[in-house]
Image (tube, rainbow, N blue to C red):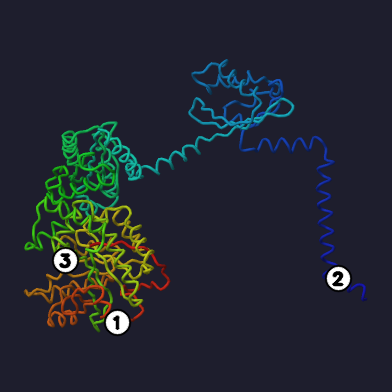
Amino acid sequence: MSRQTEDQSPRAFAWRRRFAQMVAAIRYDLSWRFTRPGALRQRFEQAIANLPQGICLYDADDRLHLVNEQFCRIYNQPMSRLRTGMRLYDVLADSCSLGNYPGRSLDDIYAARKAFIDRREKGIFLQELGDGRLIAIHHQPLEDGGWVCTYEDITERRKAEAQVEFLAHHDSLTELPNRRFFTDRLNQATTRATSGNRCALLCLDLDGFKEVNDRLGHAAGDVLLKNVAMRLKDAIRSSDTCARLGGDEFAILLPDSSAADALRVANDLAFVLRQPYFLGAFGSADVTASIGIAMAPDHAVTADELMLKADRALYKSKNARQSLPVVFDEALDLSPQMETSRLQKASAKKSSSDELQEIADDLRLALKNGGELCLHYQPICDARNGRPVVVEALARWHNPVRGHVSPLEFVKAAERHGLINQLLKWALASACHEAAHWDGNLKVSVNLSPLNLGLPDLLNSVEQALGDSGLPARRLVLELTEASAVDRSSDTLERLRELSAIGVEIWLDDFGSGYANFEYLRYLPCHVVKIDRSFLAEYEKRRELLGGMIDLAHACGLKVVAEGVETAEHLSLLQSLGCDLLQGFLLARPLPSGELQAVLRRGLPYHESRSIVPGTNFAGSNPAKISSGA
């Protein structure tokens, strides 16, 4: 009884399983070793027949010993036409008779193939057949003097690779070169331009494209963009390069062109593009084009500078609203922000081009040497309890000769003379370094110029400032003017989304003072809007208008800042309307860093550990980089 129990133990069962597996393995091995020769050959032939590649085996006398059906399918040679013992010359002759080698003689094909075989080298070569298919041939010499080749039809693979390569450098919708491809061409052209080969850059933007999208739908907009692309390609020379930069923005590079040539081409393009478009089932559409022109080396010697100048000329063309091309000129007031500033602040001091150039020269030295520029900080407070939530960094410049220089003047000079990026980097670095010493929840905001958004390295500048200072990205705010918001190019939106993705908050400043409206908030990655100070002025229906703007912003999930709060009446009105944040002289004036630190040490910082952005938790975000404006 005990012996029977022992045999049924788990250890005995395990031993029996292993023994059964060993027997099965030995039986399988012996079945191959002692199988009938005919059965083994049958299995071998089945394996060869089912290979996905064609295969041919030749002996040392170049006689065919083995061929499979896949080879016959590739070369359109029925198995009945090929037989064991055929020489390579005869196999090639049969293939030539089927049209696989058009334009080549049999002797030439055989001589080239035989020369390769006789070298006794392993290799791969490509063969194009008469029907356009591409075959990859893998040649392997054998020790007995023979050789074996495998054949693979790689036509579709090469087409897919070519398509991937094409899409890497072209826009998928219009099939025009994309920004990456165009930038390479532009870099080459500007490099040659320094040697006397002038070139022209045309930047185009469609006027009325948004209305087509809104009226007929995005599918109709796509058809329109394809039509625009075809007209552009048909209107330029083969040596010119036309690209879609994103959205409804296009650019054209004209090598070896004068300003007069470029203006003529631009006028022709404007005429061609304003002709009616027929969009099939979607109906018809009418758009025009604004065009900005810049020349190398006349206006710039690098691709980035030339693009910036052409963009400025484009802004001028667009603001004119006459569909007339504009050639870049230093005397033009080219920044949309400056257009708005000029209308809003008519009392500000106007500078001539010469004076702006002198201011820019002094500013360049100030940025290089340090000491003259500084930041003042104005708190933005919670409307409920008056505690600072954000501190706005404001650039100040005191020149030993000029004395105090208005930000309106030196920001304008920086924009016009290519210093706005340097000014931004300085402001970002200074503000982030200062804010890193504040209470852990107090944020700092830096203003961006519209031109800053056109800089490809904006994200890198922001990340560098954050990384160098150790300030977490969640504590940085970037404020955009309405002029910035009007630019809805895909590149601009992508830069803003990248900044938002690392934890930086995006605010829209001076809201309601210019072109922007709540429609822009649909696509901007915006967290907060700042109502322009002009809405606090005494006029009829002030309460109704302010209340409506605040309610609409809240309905969009946004917080609201009111700037220009200077009286107790302003404070009471905004609190009663549910405004979230307040900024103005009533609460605090802009303060130098030292005075701000003294105020903060008195216990005013905002201590609640949450973001003012609804539904956002940055507790786990990593320190990142930031960009700054003046």
Tag 1's secondary structure?
A: helix
Tell which of 610 and 137 is nearer to you: 610
| Precedes in sequence: disc 2 or disc 3 | 2
Residue bearing mark 1: 601
* Residue annotated with mark 3: 512
**Camera-nearest label, 1 or 2:** 1
Closest to the observer: 409 or 9? 409
Tell whether 267 sits left or right of 18: left
Mark 1 Cα within 10 Å, few/some/many (few <14, many 20+)? Answer: few
Identify the residue under disc 2.
8
Do the numbered discs 2 and 3 sit on residues whose CB atoms are within 8 Å?
no
Res 299 label: none
- Give the Cα separation between the discs numbered 2 and 3: 88 Å
Q: Earlier in the sequence, mark 3 or mark 1?
A: 3
* Cβ–Cβ under 8 Å for marks 1 and 2: no
Residue 107 locus on image (x, y percent):
57, 15
Residue 178, picture quadrant: top left
The quadrant of the picture occupied by the N terminus is bottom right
CA–CA distance in space, label 1 to label 2: 82 Å
The kind of residue on which mark 3 rests is Gly
Task: Give percent across and percent down for residue 541.
Answer: 9, 74
Look at label 1 and name its amino acid.
Arg
Q: How many marks?
A: 3
Looking at the image, is mark 1 or mark 2 earlier in the sequence? Answer: 2
Name the residue type under label 2. Gln
Q: Residue 209 appears at what percent x and percent y? A: 22, 50
Label 3: element kind = loop
In the rendered image, residue 82, in percent from the top left (x then y), is placed at 65, 23
Quarter holding residue 229: top left
Find numbered disc 2 in the image and state the secondary structure of the residue it sits on: loop
